[in-house]
Image (cartoon, rainbow, N blue to C red):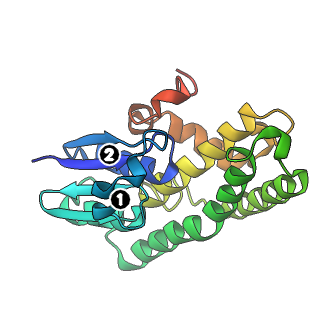
């Protein structure tokens, strides 16, 4: 029985898992979820994840939620091609970067999502939006200093790349679709921007691109 991914299109947390599945070539089925259809309120879904959030994977009789934990599970069951380095110290740094992305950048992004996407235009708080944008830019400026090569933590596409890219892609989409906010061009510095372009050239990113976002950049 193939692994099943319960996902929400455009969610950076579910996207990272979809990227990892595609990168590793793990057979899987996609189970799209909808807020409007009430999927998250269903008792069947609560039985899979009592927190009622995605992603959730079902693999035979095993159920797991929380995207960072899912990435590590996929690495364990399908170690090739890897998402984490074999060297313990490099592997630890990659794990640290995944947690940094979730602890800091994702927190600021969620503040922006709440202030813009989940708030009607006539009720938006300019001060709250400006603060979220400022924090997001500052965090991305820090990530400028972390890039070691073509990828975030070394010479191969790994878990930090799969984690950070969907977060920055969503921030850029919010900027491009909401005139008057930060522009996609001044969201990130040159190293992050170049890294984004490299990510968008990867088949695994293009193959998992959220369908309702239209064509990926450069398509």
Residue at left offset 70%, top offset 59%: 111
Which residue is more in the foreground, 44 or 146?
Answer: 44
Q: Is residue 121 left or right of residue 83?
A: right
Near-viewer residue (10 or 134): 10
Residue furthest toward the left?
1
Circle 2: element type: helix
Specify few, some or many for label 1: CA neighbours under 10 Å numbering under 14, 14-19, or 20 or more.
many
Q: Residue at x 82, y 43 (%)?
A: 182
The earlier-in-sequence mark between 1 and 2 is 2
The spot of residue 24 in percent (x, y) is: 26, 48
Q: Where is residue 187 in the image (x, y as percent from the top left)?
A: 76, 46
Image coords of residue 62 (percent x, y): 18, 64
Residue 23 tag number: 2
Task: In the rendered view, tell whether residue 77 sits above or below residue 162.
Answer: below
Image height check: is 120 above or below 83?
above
Residue in view at x 71 percent, y 64 percent: 142
Residue 186 appears in the figure:
yes
Position of residue 204 relative to residue 132, above or below, is above
Q: Do the residues labelled 1 and 2 touch (CB within 8 Å)?
A: yes
Image side of residue 105 versus residue 115, left or right: left
Residue 9 lies left or right of residue 81; in this view the side is right
Query: Label 1 belongs to which residue?
Result: 83
């Amino acid at each position: 029985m193939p692994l099943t991914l319960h996902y929400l299109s455009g969610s950076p947390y579910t996207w990272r898992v979809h990227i990892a599945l595609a990168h590793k070539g793990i057979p899987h089925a996609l189970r799209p979820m909808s807020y409007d259809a009430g999927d998250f309120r269903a008792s069947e879904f609560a039985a899979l994840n009592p927190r009622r959030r995605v992603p959730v994977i079902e693999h035979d009789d095993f159920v797991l939620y929380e995207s960072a934990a899912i990435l590590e599970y996929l690495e364990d069951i399908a170690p090739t091609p890897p998402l984490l380095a074999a060297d313990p110290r490099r592997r630890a740094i990659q794990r640290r970067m995944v947690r940094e992305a979730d602890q800091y950048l994702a927190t600021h992004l969620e503040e922006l999502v709440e202030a813009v996407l989940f708030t009607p235009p006539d009720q938006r708080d300019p001060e709250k939006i400006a603060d979220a944008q400022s924090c997001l830019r500052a965090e991305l400026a820090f990530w400028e200093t972390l890039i070691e090569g073509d990828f975030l933590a070394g010479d191969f596409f790994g878990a930090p790349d799969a984690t950070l890219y969907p977060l920055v892609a969503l921030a850029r989409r919010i900027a491009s679709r909401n005139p008057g906010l930060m522009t996609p061009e001044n969201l990130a510095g040159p190293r992050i921007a170049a890294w984004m372009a490299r990510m968008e050239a990867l088949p695994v990113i293009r193959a998992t691109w959220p369908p309702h976002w239209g064509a990926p950049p450069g398509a």
